Image: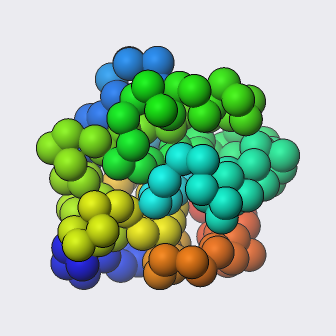
Amino acid sequence: MSGTPPGVGETAPDFTLQNQHGEAASLTERLADGPVLLVFYPFAWSGICTGELCGIRDDIGGFTGDGRAEVVAVSCDPIFTLRAWADAEHYDFDLLSDFWPHGAVASSYGVFNDQAGMSIRGTFLVDASRTIRWSQVNGPGEARDFAGYRDALGALAAR
């Protein structure tokens, strides 16, 4: 593994990556509009990853809190793979490519498996001050449980 993931209350590492359309997307810019849910996942087209991202797509209001947060998914796949996958699965949120330098952003979040060359399932709710308000890290083959996320998003909305 690439290190220890930042915990709740710690500052989220900033980054700029390209989305599936080749557009630059930075965490700081996204946070100007409100909290961001960062969803690191291993590979496009894989079974658990497709199931999780389709679950987000199908309940996007539950994940965005009706517009109070933005979902941003991150993997080490190249942008062309992400574009094909987003088009095929109708993902309306950004899929960011951490392809090169390979896994640098995932490493900064402590969720890069350098032996396998992929992210593991790390999930971070980041508020406007770049503070992590909720996180969950799951190993390969372990699906996420987003129940705690909804509580954390509700607590942010109540502030």
Q: Residue 142 occupies which quadrant of the picture? A: bottom right
Q: Quadrant of the C terminus?
A: bottom right
Locate residue 18, reporting x and y percent: 34, 28
Q: Looking at this view, is 135 or 57 the one in front?
A: 57
Tell me: 115 left or right of 127: left
Tell me: 51 left or right of 42: right
Tell me: 157 left or right of 137: right
Q: Residue 93 occupies which quadrant of the picture? A: top right
Q: Looking at this view, is 41 or 81 the one in front?
A: 81
In the rendered image of this protein, does residue 63 appear above or below residue 21? below
Locate residue 78, reporting x and y percent: 36, 35
Residue 37 shows in the view: yes
Q: What residue do we see at 41% from left, 49% from top?
A: 75
Locate residue 53, reporting x and y percent: 67, 51
Return the residue found at the far left.
101
Locate residue 23, reporting x and y percent: 38, 18
Q: Quadrant of the N terminus?
A: bottom left
Q: What residue do we see at 28% from left, 61% from top?
A: 117
Q: What residue do we see at 73% from left, 58% from top?
A: 51
Q: Looking at this view, is 105 or 75 the one in front?
A: 75
In the rendered image of this protein, does residue 151 appear above or below residue 89? below
Q: What residue do we see at 27% from left, 35% from top?
A: 16
